[in-house]
Amino acid sequence: MLQNYLRKRFVSCNFLKRDDFDIYAMMSAARETQGDFDDFFMVDEDHLLIAADYVSEDGIPADMYMSIAEKLIARHASMPSDQLNTENKEETKQLPQKVMAWIGIMDLKSGELFYVNANADSPVIKKDGQFRILEDKEDAILMADEGFKEYCIKMREGDRLFLYSGRAVNAANERYGTDRILECLNKLNEDADCKKTVLTVSADIKEFTGLGKQFDDLTLLAFDYTPKNKEKDIIERTFDATIDKLPEVIAFVEEQLEMHDASMKAVMTISVALEEMFVNIAHYAYPDSQGKATVGVSFDGDDVSISLRDNGISFDPLAKEDPDISAKAEDRQIGGLGIFMVKNSMDNCFYERRGNENYFVMTKRIR
């Protein structure tokens, strides 16, 4: 995937005019020269390269090594895994075994971040409002003969990537480690931008280390994804919550899916899940009266969210314990298989009680 983008030449792009991402980086050298660096530039109008490289020493040798590594990234524009695997064998002979790298390409249209990790510090990712370590990591070094694995994660609006390198210790020789980074990041206000994030972590590190001499290079980088041209509008229709309205409900949702070129497989999977959830409302939401159910459809890139709202009795479908599908049919409790199927066929499901309303959303990639 990434070789298609990284082989292109640098395309001039004014970051100040971009509204689909925010990025900020800071580098602090332990000496006059630095062996760690963060870099980012537009490969083309839709793809951003982000790189973090370092060596496990500092001073002039480290600065020379990283100059070579930076040139490899800027000039060779191959897929990160390709770049570290095959294309730069001759040039990387100049690099020491201590050179490490994390290289990623952000597809600003799809929200997909493709990356490789050559034994660099694992980045931190903010998902669902919480920072956590991005676990995928290659246990290898830049000069490794074996191949590097390429990973991909889907970033959505509100997600944040945080890269760091360097070892900071205090007078008691305690290290400012991953736990402290996560604690600092998770204390940030929701409105903190990338610059505020980097400066806050930097200040926290300085407070932790005190007045002691900085013995290692330090790099910090924060990246926010804010997809543009998102289809935020929710298209909704309200139906009588009765079984005979099911064909109309299915037709309404399938029409929206077809308009957005959803795959046949996605349409069928969503329709089956929608049937299960609407029938549940029709059967159980209004035991003593006839009520309504509102079905909504919204798109975010290649993802669709289907929402169902009703004013029936409170019912959280996700709270029901999953059935034991390994047990014999006669040994299983009645019910639960439909909800279990929905949870396992959708990419994500969410429920909450809003006042006197049940609100359920299921999300699925359509292509």
Image (cartoon, grey):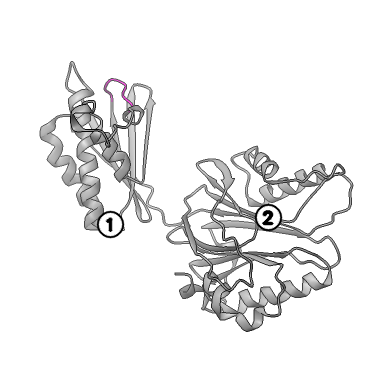
The circle drawn on residue 164 is 2
The one nearer the camera, 326 or 5, is 326
Region rendered in magenta: 311-316
Point out the residue furthest to the top here: 288
Identify the residue at horizontal 42%, vertical 60% (top origin): 110
In the rendered image, is residue 77 in sight?
yes
Position of residue 311 relative to residue 150, above or below, is: above
Point out residue 48 in the picture as x, y percentages from the top left corner. 54, 66
> Circle 1 sits in a helix, a strand or a loop, which is it?
loop
The circle drawn on residue 260 is 1
Determine whether, in the image, residue 111 is placed left or right of residue 234. right
Which is more N-terminal, label 1 or label 2? 2
> Circle 2 sits in a helix, a strand or a loop, which is it?
strand
Task: Pick the quarter of the image with the N terminus.
Answer: bottom left
Mark 2 belongs to which amino acid?
A: Tyr
Mark 1 belongs to which amino acid?
A: His
The one nearer the camera, 96 or 205, is 96
In the rendered image, is residue 107 in sight?
no
Identify the residue at horizontal 32%, vertical 45% (top origin): 346
The circle drawn on residue 75 is none
Point out residue 194 in the picture as x, y percentages from the top left corner. 63, 51
Residue 91 in the magenta stretch? The answer is no
Determine whether, in the image, residue 177 is placed left or right of residue 307. right
Q: Could you tell me what secondary structure mostly forms the magenta stretch?
A: loop
Point out residue 308 in the picture as x, y percentages from the top left corner. 28, 35
